[in-house]
Amino acid sequence: KEQPSGIIGIGGGTLLDLAKAVSIMLTNNGETKDYQGWDLVKNPAIYHVGIPTISGTGAEVSRTTVLTGPERKLGINSDYTPFDQVVLDSELTKEVPKDQWFYTGMDCYIHCIESLNGEFINSFSRTYGETALELCKEVFLGSLETEESQDKLMMASWHGGMSIAYSQVGVAHAMSYGLGFVLGTKHGIGNCIVFNYLEDYYPEGVAIFKKMVEKHQVDIPTGICSDLTEEQMEKMINVALSLEPLWENALGEKWKSIMTREKLRSMYLKM
């Protein structure tokens, strides 16, 4: 009967999403799996505050809290999900290990590429997405001082999150969710693994991504799907294809005739 006055999430994307989920479930009956989807939350969440300690996920501003449920990995997407207040302090990100900094930063970069090249793009999303994309290029292709790089990547994360909040992501995120559910692949790494093979869908974005990988000498894991069982592959395909808004944004209304199960299987087997 007594509710807390607020929830504070301090950490990376997972912790921020957890804080958003807790704030929602304190005022809504049932289990979190009941709200995995779009606009299923009925009651406003408890007042909640986000303090990111890594930049790139956009969790500090998005209307999604990504959860791995018993059947799928899917977010609680609602107008009650976003934080009521956010504290952005790039000093909190200075101890992030290099590879984690890169992978999470690429989450932001891929947000921008998928949003700006999607069917759901609009002037509002484009403005934020273009700003975030330019900041990502400055951070990952430029020669900024560390402190300036931290500041700009935190702003890129915010703007990239705002862009997808009013549009949508695409192929990389849909396939990454499949990797995350079946193999437990961390989101940022999963996005990079998938995006590395998406020249057919985002040719310019992938070309720039590969320059960033080369500049920072980051090894993108390969061969992670080579030993999957048939059951694992089917589950991965099911999870990816369940994210229909992402596919529609990327490929249009007739996406089901383009991204068949066979096509998706062949793409996973490359990774």
Image (cartoon, rainbow, N blue to C red):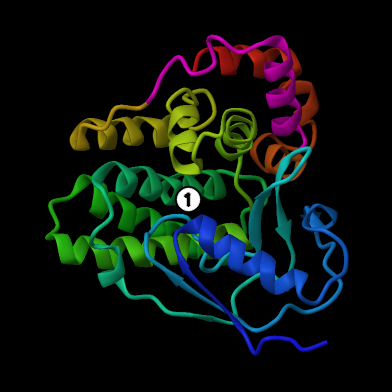
For residue 35, above or below residue 61: above
Q: Is residue 230 magenta?
A: yes
Q: Position of residue 89 (x, y in %)?
A: 33, 75
Which type of secondary structure does the marked residue at label 1 adopt? helix
Query: Residue flagged by tag 1: what amino acid is it?
Result: Cys
Q: Position of residue 109 (x, y in %)?
A: 41, 48
Q: Residue at x 22, y 45 (%)?
A: 141
Left or right of 172 in this view: 207: left
For residue 200, above or below residue 86: above
Circle 1 Cα neighbour tier, 10 Å, few/some/many (<14 / 14–19 / ≥20): many
Left or right of 147 in this view: 2: right
Name the quarter where the N terminus is drawn.
bottom right
Residue 123 showing in the rendered view: no
Q: Residue at x 37, y 60 (%)?
A: 54
Q: Is residue 70 magenta?
A: no
Residue 142 showing in the rendered view: yes
Q: Residue at x 76, y 27 (%)?
A: 238
Left or right of 34 in this view: 58: left
Q: Position of residue 134 (x, y in %)?
A: 33, 55
Q: Position of residue 67 (x, y in %)?
A: 67, 51
Quarter-of-image position of residue 23: bottom right
Question: What segment is highlighted magenta in the picture?
Answer: 221-242
Tag count: 1
Residue with the mark numbered 1:
112
For residue 203, above or below residue 15: above
Tell which of 117 and 151 is nearer to you.
151
Q: Residue at x 51, y 34 (%)?
A: 185
Tell which of 158 and 127 is nearer to you.
158
